[in-house]
Image (cartoon, rainbow, N blue to C red):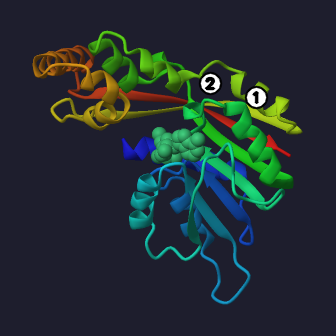
Amino acid sequence: MADPAARLNQPLLAALALQPHHTLLDLASGAGEPAITAAKDMNPAQGSEGGRVLASDLVPAMLAGARRRGAGVAALSFLAADMTALPLAPASVDRISCRFGLMFVPDAAGAVAEMHRVLRPGGIAALLCWGPKVGNTLFRLLDEALGGVPELAVLFRFAEEGALGRLFLDAGFDTVSETSLEQSALADPAKPFWRPTLDMAFTPALARMSAEGRAAVEDRIAAAVALETKLDGKIPVHLHARLLVAHK
Ligand SMILES: C[S@@+](CC[C@H](N)C(=O)[O-])C[C@H]1O[C@@H](n2cnc3c(N)ncnc32)[C@H](O)[C@@H]1O
């Protein structure tokens, strides 16, 4: 699924209109996206006052992965920080990005207020959150196979059209726009393309199950995959995200 995820990066980065001298703060970078892609594109000229990308995350262990993947990228640096209490001065960054991070923050309004505080006037924040579960094949299929997992609801916290926009307007941003982004890929049903999503998004539910329960879930996933496989032998996997772009 790296390919559709990378294609979601493109509109997110395009919305930021990054200039070579900008400082981009990437929040909830996890294993490093979109920070690493943005920093590679920045390519600061040696010795000049080049731009930089600050990859940040609440969990230092996540940033360890980002450090490995981003080794040698000159414009990239790292910051372990909670996005509701950023250790940065007011109006100190030109751009903010956040890919699939905001919905995990209980005080999302507090996080958006922090974005507004550290962004300079005229700056841009661009975020991606998941759209509705029905438009996200992997989450839908796996949730059904597990019989409905309550914790999954957090992923779709901003799935309703307009929810993100309201949050940013309430925080004092001047203009906001919200766009639906949809991507599709064809997966090979013979391969466990669903396993990374199962392991990442469904960990608490799996931990509550016995070994037999987990085996039964895998059987149900195999049955659902077979049912959704088309005549060409591939299974279409759709992603639906919401892109929020806010100007200060
Ligand atoms: C699904 S990952 C997204 C990673 C990456 N941006 C991507 O798109 O691949 C969500 C990340 O949000 C981080 N996170 C959760 N709460 C946070 C907070 N309060 N402040 C900063 N990061 C947070 C988690 O540690 C995790 O790395």
Numbered label tally: 2
In the image, residue 113 sits, relative to residue 72, either above or below, namely: above
Residues at badges 1 and 2 in contact (C-beta under 8 Å)? Answer: yes
Residue occupying image coordinates x 24% and y 15%: 224
Looking at marks 1 and 2 on the same chain, the residue that comes earlier in the sequence is marked by 2
Q: Residue furthest top?
A: 147
Q: Position of residue 185 (x, y in %)?
A: 38, 35
User: Front-most of 72 and 241?
Assistant: 72
Where is mark 2, residue-wise?
158
Q: Is residue 48 left or right of residue 67?
A: right
Q: Amino acid at mark 1?
A: Leu
Alpha-carbon span between mark 1 and mark 2: 10 Å
Residue 234 found in image quarter: top left
Q: Position of residue 193 (x, y in %)?
A: 26, 35
Where is mark 1, residue-wise?
167
Residue 90 found in image quarter: bottom right
In the rendered image, which quarter contains the N terminus?
top left
User: Front-most of 237 and 110?
Assistant: 110
Q: Amino acid at mark 2?
A: Phe
In the image, residue 180 sits, relative to residue 55, either above or below, namely: above
Q: Is residue 164 at least partly visible in the picture?
A: yes
Q: Position of residue 64 (x, y in %)?
A: 41, 61
Q: Is residue 187 left or right of residue 139?
A: left
Q: Is residue 213 left or right of residue 63?
A: left
Residue occupying image coordinates x 54% and y 68%: 40
